[in-house]
Image (cartoon, grey):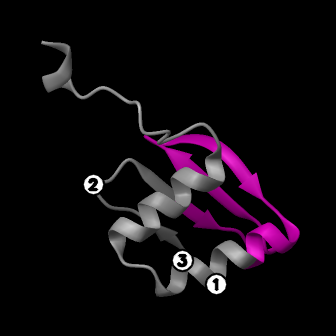
Amino acid sequence: MSFETEAEFSYQLVKDGKVRVFWRDRHVVTLTGQKAATFRERIESADEREAQLLMARVTGNFKRGNERTPRDRE
């Protein structure tokens, strides 16, 4: 089972309970054990925006608040 949209992040649930998280179709992190279980619980009730934020959070150095948008660079 996977979650795929036009968004930046996606995830894949693996049979053995692991969760693989992808950013722009690149594997970023694999969650195991309690982290995977917690992620599964939270992602089930999350809407699309919340799911994206959750995946950003579990991957580590994403969305710190200081990212520049293309508009800011001009």
Asked if residue 74 is positioned above or below residue 16 in the image, the reply reads: above
State left or right for residue 65 relative to residue 70. Answer: right
**What whole-number distance in Å separates the C-alpha atoms at marks 3 and 2?**
17 Å
When asked about the image quadrant of residue 41, the answer is bottom right
Is 17 in the magenta? yes
Is 44 in the magenta? no
Q: Which amino acid type corresponds to the residue marked 3 in the rendered image?
A: Ile
The residue pinned by badge 3 equals 43
When asked about the image quadrant of residue 40, the answer is bottom right
Q: Which residue is found at the position 27% from the left and 54% from the top?
A: 6
The residue range painted magenta reads 11-37
The residue pinned by badge 1 equals 41
**What whole-number distance in Å separates the C-alpha atoms at marks 3 and 1?**
6 Å
Q: Which residue is found at the position 87% from the left and 70% from the top?
A: 33
Instruction: Check if mark 3's residue and mark 1's residue have beta carbons within 8 Å.
Output: yes
| Disc with the residue nearer the chain's start (3 vs 2) | 2
| Disc with the residue nearer the chain's start (2 vs 1) | 2
Q: Closer to the camera: disc 2 or disc 1?
A: 1
The residue pinned by badge 2 equals 6
Q: Where is residue 38 in the image (x, y as percent from the top left)?
A: 72, 77
Q: Which amino acid type corresponds to the residue marked 1 in the rendered image?
A: Glu
When asked about the image quadrant of residue 51, the answer is bottom left
